[in-house]
Amino acid sequence: MSELKAVVLDRDGVINEESDEFVKSPEEWIAIEGSLKAIAKLNQAKVKVFIASNQSGIARELFDYDALNQIHKKMLSELAQHGGHLDGIFICPDLEGECRKPKTGMLVEIEKRAHISLEKAPFIGDSLRDVQAAITHGSQPILVRTGNGSVTSQSEQLPRNIPIYDDLAQAVDTLLSE
């Protein structure tokens, strides 16, 4: 395996089921099969795992920070049951701005706070904006077909050389075998 030190993940559609209505409560947060175990595998391989997630539902007033914290508490609890953890959760609650993907503000913030470089680090997402943020930042974009990924994989705007996997588990197994 090459020097895999950190991985950035989008949340909705990669770790948990995507919802067109937004994930607004812990009850609506449902892990995608194999995703939590995949994060635990990264942890066991001493890879730092960060989330970079647009959460515009806050600006849209569909849920508040307390609800988001409760959703993340559930996610972290279920992840811990698989022996996993996250090294940081970064969100952008805004409808626009430097933090909102496809801009790279969250990736810059991860680097600053964690004192690491995400250059060439895998960024696994399910949408074109995840891929665009990774490319702009110099990270390695990876697309999964879960969430919006199947539709995104058919997009004319998607660069042709982007690795595409069925889900996070398959992507992580491939990364850890390289």
Image (cartoon, rainbow, N blue to C red):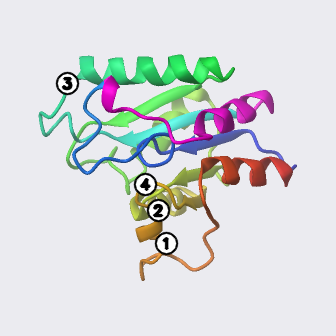
Identify the image quadrant of the C terminus.
bottom right
Residue 62 x/y as whole percent: 15, 34
Asked whether disc 2 touches disc 1, contact meaning CB atoms under 8 Å apart, the reply is yes
| Residue type of the residue flagged with mark 4 | Gly
Q: Which residue is mark 3?
A: 64
Label 1: how many residues lie within 10 Å, few (<14), some (14-19) or many (20+)?
many
Residue at (57% x, 43% y) in the render: 8
Residue that label 4 marks: 147
Q: CA distance from mark 2 to mark 3?
A: 27 Å
Spatial separation of the CA atoms under disc 4 and disc 3: 23 Å
What segment is highlighted magenta in the picture? 26-47
With 90 as the anchor, is 162 left or right in this view? right
Whole-percent x and y of residue 171?
67, 53
Which residue, given by chain and number where applicable, does mark 2 sit on? 149
**Left or right side of 14 for 171:** right
Q: Nearer the viewer, residue 140 or 172?
A: 172
Label 3 near label 4: C-beta < 8 Å?
no
Name the residue type under label 2. Answer: Gly
Check the image and name the residue furthest to the bottom.
Answer: 156
Give yes or no for contact between labels 4 and 2 (Cβ–Cβ under 8 Å).
yes
Q: Earlier in the sequence, mark 4 or mark 1?
A: 4
Q: Name the residue beneath numbered marker 1.
A: 153
Tell me how far mark 4 sits from mark 2, CA to CA: 5 Å
Graded by Cα atoms within 10 Å as few (under 14), some (14 to 19) or many (20 or more), the crowding at tag 2 reads: many
Residue pictured at 67% horizontal, 54% vertical: 120
The answer to if 51 sits in the magenta stretch is no
Look at the numbered discs 2 and 3 and tell me whether their residues touch, using CB distance below 8 Å: no
Mark 4 residue crowding within 10 angstroms, few (<14) / some (14–19) / many (20+) = many
* Residue at mark 3 to residue at mark 1: CA–CA distance: 32 Å
Amino acid type of disc 1?
Ser
32 vs 157: above or below: above
Q: Find numbered disc 1 in the image and state the secondary structure of the residue it sits on.
A: loop
